[in-house]
Image (tube, coloured by chain):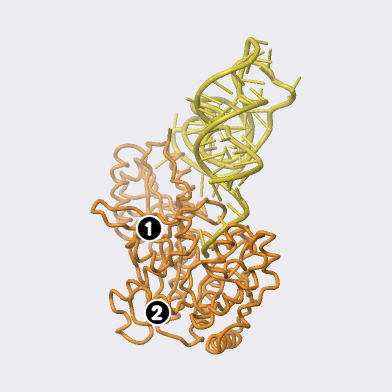
Amino acid sequence: MRFQAPRGTHDVLPGVSFQWRFVEKKFREVCRRFGYGEIRTPTFEDTGLLLRGIGESSEIVVDKQMYTFDDPGGDSLTLRPEGTAPTVRAFLEHSLYAQGPITKVCYVGPIFRYERPQSGRLREHHQCGIELFGATDPAADAEVIQLGVTYLRSLGITGEEIHLNSVGCPLCRPAYLQRLRDFITPSLDRMCGNCKRRYEVNPLRILDCKVEECRKASAEAPPILEALCEECGDHFRGCRDTLDLYGIEYVLDSRLVRGLDYYTKTAFEFLHAGLGAQSAVLSGGRYDGLVEECGGSGTPGVGFGSGVERLLLAMEAENRTTPQPESLTAFVITLGEAARKVGLTVLNELRAGGVAADIDYAGRSMKAQMKEANRTGAKYAVILGEDEVNQGVVTLKNLRTSEQESVQRQEVCATILTSQSGDRGVNNEPGDS
RNA sequence: GUGGGUGUAGCUCAGUUGGUUAGAGCACCAGAUUGUGGCUCUGGGGGCCGAGGGUUCAAGUCCCUUCACUCACCCCA
């Protein structure tokens, strides 16, 4: 019985890891352009924080989707099921608010939820996200959306559709929820079990239900956008105005609600048609109550999270290619014991000099070594046999042109570096460099 | 947790109404070329046919169980 990666997890192998680096690099570039600094928080947090942050009534908690465990010391810890609450915790713990009225951070990292895996949904997945603290200005909401659009564009994705809604605030939502309940009540006994529970806990989610009976029952429900208080209405209008200013298109979606309890006002979701059932590639919104809920003073916030795996699927659906990983520059080929020794020395010099170089360790024939050199994509084969060793030279073969020349051993590295600087830009760099 | 689909070589897949020793392409290794890659040709290594049980003279094939993967529901990035 061989071991397998745990259900809902996956290995990112060398053949695709450069795509991940590409995506993360683009995300960080865009964040930098918008003034967001990167924050790295722990993979697990105090369970209490996540319960508080996510809300005890959220489906994540109710469905026991959290990886919660007691550590040997008896503390209850949880692998983070989302990125915002940990960021808020760090924001408060380190008093980032003291450095100015506005704090902007971004993060990249793994997220864990115990769910049944399917396409675009894993038990461990990775999210890129941003949080903007301290602004009630609706232009901040628009910036967050704008950053999301810019990020997707930088990956070559253009096929997303932005859904926008407002979920109100503690002033206007309760009244709306009551109206919604009143509207639903007559049909309640026909609805699914989930919705019966939602009716009590979070009636907004009924609008999101896919069961036929529930859809029918809520079809004519009053839209929340008409029930917003003056402040929320103004805010939503302000956000839309700024999006118009930025030329960002979106569709109003009064059924767009949030699974997490802390959201207020603006809610948005970027959907992509190429992904199957799990089509949200980026989603977020405003959470003006969360910081206070987590023990801070009333600080507004707005942000988004975006799944890396789903974005990669979206790129694939749009046939976007990432730059190929940079290959080796030189492959050292030796024949015989004496040449082997010199070859290892040359290899060492090349690497020390900054040339990406490798050598065969399988004791293969020259032909096989040539083949290997070719397979690695190396531009040069550095060939060393008896003749070369005796003459203090190497045979430098250009594998692209098949031309080869004799080069003094001491000059191999310099020769390769010189010729390389001539074709800068030929090889695209995949990620960090 | 609920339903559907699929499990045969490293990968993608054939495998007839059950019938000898389970195949192909790609990949890998070697040779053709005793010091030269890509193209071509020849040869080779690789399989508890997901696992367990059953039916049968005979099971990759039929039946049951189980596991894994996968898609969808729920929920979400």
Above-or-below relation of A428 to A14: below
- Disc 2: which residue: A104
Q: In which quarter of the image is the C terminus of chain A?
A: bottom left
Determine which quarter of the picture holds residue B55.
top right
Above-or-below relation of A293 to A423: below
Q: Which residue lies furthest to the left in this view?
A: A73
| Residue A125 appears in the picture as rendered | yes
Using the rendered image, report if marks 2 and 1 lie on a common chain. yes
Q: Mark 1 lies on which chain?
A: A
- A390 relative position to A172: left or right: left
Indicate the position of residue A155 as horizontal and vertical percent values. 54, 68
| Residue A312 appears in the picture as rendered | no
Indicate the position of residue B12 as horizontal and vertical percent values. 61, 42
Q: Which of marks 2 and 1 is in front?
A: 1
Within 10 angstroms of label 2, few (less than 14), some, or many (20 or more) residues? many
- Disc 1: which residue: A79
Chain coloured orange here: A
Return the residue nearer the eye: A162 or A286. Answer: A286
Residue located at (29% from left, 40% from top): A338
Q: Which amino acid does label 2 sit on?
A: Lys
Determine which quarter of the picture holds residue A222.
bottom right
Query: Mark 2 and mark 1: span between their CA atoms?
Result: 24 Å
Q: Which color was chain B given? A: yellow
User: Element under label 2?
Assistant: strand
User: Element under label 1?
Assistant: strand
Indicate the position of residue A385 as horizontal and vertical percent values. 36, 42
